[in-house]
Amino acid sequence: MKLLDRNIILGYIAAFGSAISYGIVTLVAQKIVSDYFPPVVASAFSIIIGMVILGVLFFKDIFKDIQVITLRAFLWAIVAGISGAWGVTFWFIALNNGPIVIVAPISATFPLVSLSLTYVFLKKVERLTFRVVVGSLFVVLGVVIIASINN
Amino acid sequence: MIVVVLALLASIGFGASAVFIKLALKSMKSTTGTFLSLVAGSLILITISIIFYSDELVISNKIVFGWLVLSALLNFLGGRYLNYTSVNLLGVARATTIIGTAPLFATILAITIGSEIITWPMLLGTLMIIFGLLLVISKK
């Protein structure tokens, strides 16, 4: 393995930090959904609180950026937010219509969707290597097995 | 069959989000990208909540609020902000593959603090994830 530069190391720390956070929040969300709110309401409250906290913590950065970003970049960020909300909404609708034993493994395949869309939209920006594609397949298969068993 | 389609639609939403944010982050910081995505997402979720759950939009006490703050911190500062930062630094393919391992961490936590027991299929899944991650992380 070659020496990794600083940004790459920070990227890996961020990615694993994100995975751990998402892993922990599953347990917190279970508590909120089982004791207090329907899932969509819990998500709505949670996203508003998250937006306020992030807005306060990074106000200067966001204010500076908003003044100089291109309309195209702004729209892509909005589309990303809509996609995320689309994912959450359909995830809950799926759970309302069927068992989690089917929903969890299928929704765990999202990295493969990202790979396919990367090939389509980011051809010039990001090169997909054989290792990354095979590695992603192994990770998704492993997660599908674990998600199936957990539920 | 409808459940499979709905779950696939969810997967498409989650997967597409990373690609679109990569396009946005060409000219903004990941903090701004995360904030704008939260604004868009919150508008949708608030609208759905008002239409279908208008009677339940009340935070009854401090404990409930505390749980929601914890959820927001983990989901959007720990989860989404770091997610978008890693997409920016590593690229979509590597970042989403690593982030896709979240259920493994949920399982580890459930085993550590809960009553979950390690089974052979769980071990097989974990080994496959580790092997996949090694392939994704390593360079020739």
Image: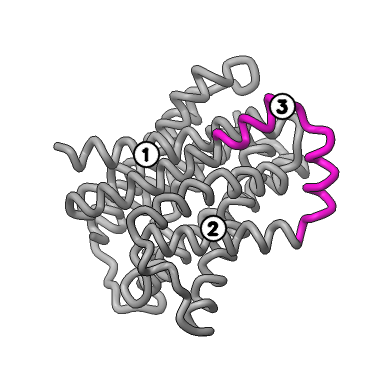
**Magenta stretch prevailing secondary structure:** helix
Pointer 2 chain: A
Residue A19 lies, in percent from the top left, at: 51, 54
Query: Does the magenta segment cover residue A150?
Result: no
Query: Considering the numbered disc 2 on the image, is that residue within a helix, a strand or a loop?
Result: helix
Nearer to us: label 1 or label 3: 3
Point 83% across, 33% down: residue:
A68
Of residues B135 and B27, the one nearer the viewer is B27
Does A59 appear above or below A71? below
In the rendered structure, does residue A66 fall within the stretch colored magenta?
A: yes
- Which mark identifies residue A71? 3
Amino acid at pointer 2:
Ile
Kindly identify which numbered label has been placed on residue B135. none
Residue beneath disc 1: B11
Task: Give x and y (percent) for residue B12.
Answer: 39, 34
Quarter of the image for residue B114 reads: bottom left
Q: Write the start and end of the magenta stretch as one range.
A: A57-79
On-image quarter of the N terminus of chain A: top right
The residue sitting at 43% across, 64% down in the picture is A42
The amino acid on which the numbered mark 3 sits, given as a three-letter code, is: Leu
